[in-house]
Amino acid sequence: QGLTGETKAEEVPSEYAIVKEVEKEVPKEPEPMPLTGIKTLVFDYKIVGTAYDTYIFIQQGDNLYIIDQHAAHEKTLYEKLVQRIREGDKAAGQILLKPQAVDLSDEDMNNVEAYKNELNTAGYLFDDFGDNTLLLREIPYAAGDVSPVELFIDAVNLLENSKGMNRLAIKEELIYDMACKAAVKAEKKLSEPEIKALVGGLIKLENPETCPHGRPVYITMNKKDFEKMFKRII
Amino acid sequence: QGLTGETKAEEVPSEYAIVKEVEKEVPKEPEPMPLTGIKTLVFDYKIVGTAYDTYIFIQQGDNLYIIDQHAAHEKTLYEKLVQRIREGDKAAGQILLKPQAVDLSDEDMNNVEAYKNELNTAGYLFDDFGDNTLLLREIPYAAGDVSPVELFIDAVNLLENSKGMNRLAIKEELIYDMACKAAVKAEKKLSEPEIKALVGGLIKLENPETCPHGRPVYITMNKKDFEKMFKRII
């Protein structure tokens, strides 16, 4: 001992100790959250099929996800649009090739004037044409198959029903209404690429579990659930 | 009145009354039972898909059937074979291209001799080759992928475990064992024609609901069940 030039670990910091010191100094990046639930569908999965042209069955390993296609699409659209509004942006609108005239009652006209800003933020742009007539120039992007005037009238009705709500809540209601109308309907047959796009959008959401109104977007079962149903296991 | 040659219905039997009389005399054929449950799959249905290569989802109108492919096939084979045995026939056997020698213990040899008739009825044909060796010539039809000798040894083991059962019960156990081995396995991918053949066989059974051991062959859900799960209705 001593002859070989060995020193005690306590005297000179070992390589390990130095590494420890560095670790202390540099704050670690947070570990990425492990993927759980439907978010694991970022990896390989199998589309089993669709029942009632409404509920999509997807299998991955031992898990089976049953997704409500309308609720899933609605939630995805809703989250995208709310995100935009929270960032101070307005919902992307699509300019109508031909502006469309909308006649309103006195009361509706008053509501529209009172909530012009919220309607604009939600993606509706229009000019006052006089005599309770508006000229609708732009409607929210992804408005689905609903006609522009119909969509706008629905939004105006929503204003009528939202009295007493604060302005932010009204904005979100307008967006929700639009998301619901634009979302793919239940009982509409989707192609495989459409299903993949739907799943891809859904799993990116912070909370893909429920639709804006709190209903489940998907249900999870696993192999054991089936084995119990079929009394293969007790 | 009277001038037109009219008579009262009470005096001469009307055409209707004659028909009534004939109906009384000829016993009606029993009405065909209305198709219920999975038996309605004789008509158009949609194969949604298969989860875990085991459970087949089939939709027809508002009903969704989840079929356990192994249990379904097992029950179908079992019923066919039991039917044959009840009609006094023996289970169809397949002649082995090359007879196979099977060596048995003294005890197994005794069991085989004691239940030769039941084994023959179940589709096993063999000759005594002396020194506790049998020459296996024929095994039950549709024995699946199991090797003939393995299948026969299983049948002999079953005899060992069936002491105290009556001979008919042992025959049915032999058939059950064979049906289970011959049936398509869980976790085997089936093609669409194979699924259709499976469904076609199943719906012809008197009782397609349970497998020979009483486990469910299929589970029925309907659209309302889904609407409740997804809180679309309460």
Image (spheres, coloured by chain):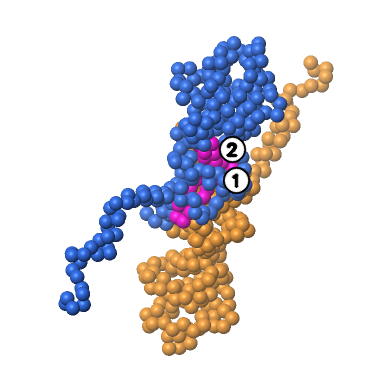
Chain colours: A orange, B blue
- Residue B52 spot, x, y in % from top left: 58, 42
User: Residue B61: within the magenta?
Assistant: yes
Amino acid carrying mark 2 in the image: Val
- Residue A208 spot, x, y in % from top left: 52, 53
Q: Quadrant of the N terminus of chain B?
A: bottom left
Residues at discs 2 and 1 both on one chain: yes
- Residue B184 spot, x, y in % from top left: 59, 38
Kindly identify the residue that appears in the image at 56 percent across and 70 percent down: A141
Residue at which label 1 appears = B194
Separation of marks 2 and 1 at Cα, in angstroms: 10 Å
Kindly identify the residue that appears in the image at 59 percent across and 11 percent down: B106
Nearer to us in this view, B103 or A89:
B103
Q: Around disc 1, counting alpha carbons within 10 Å, would you say few (fewer than 14), some (14 to 19), or many (20 or more)?
A: few
The magenta stretch is B53-78
Kindly identify the residue that appears in the image at 44 percent across and 76 percent down: A153
**Residue A170, quarter of the rendered image:** bottom left
- Residue B180 spot, x, y in % from top left: 55, 32
Instruction: Tell me: A97 left or right of A54.
Output: right
Whether residue A233 is visible here, answered yes or no, is no
**Residue B141, quarter of the rendered image:** top right
Of marks 2 and 1, which one's residue comes earlier in the chain? 2
Whether residue B73 is visible here, answered yes or no, is yes
- Secondary structure at numbered mark 1: helix
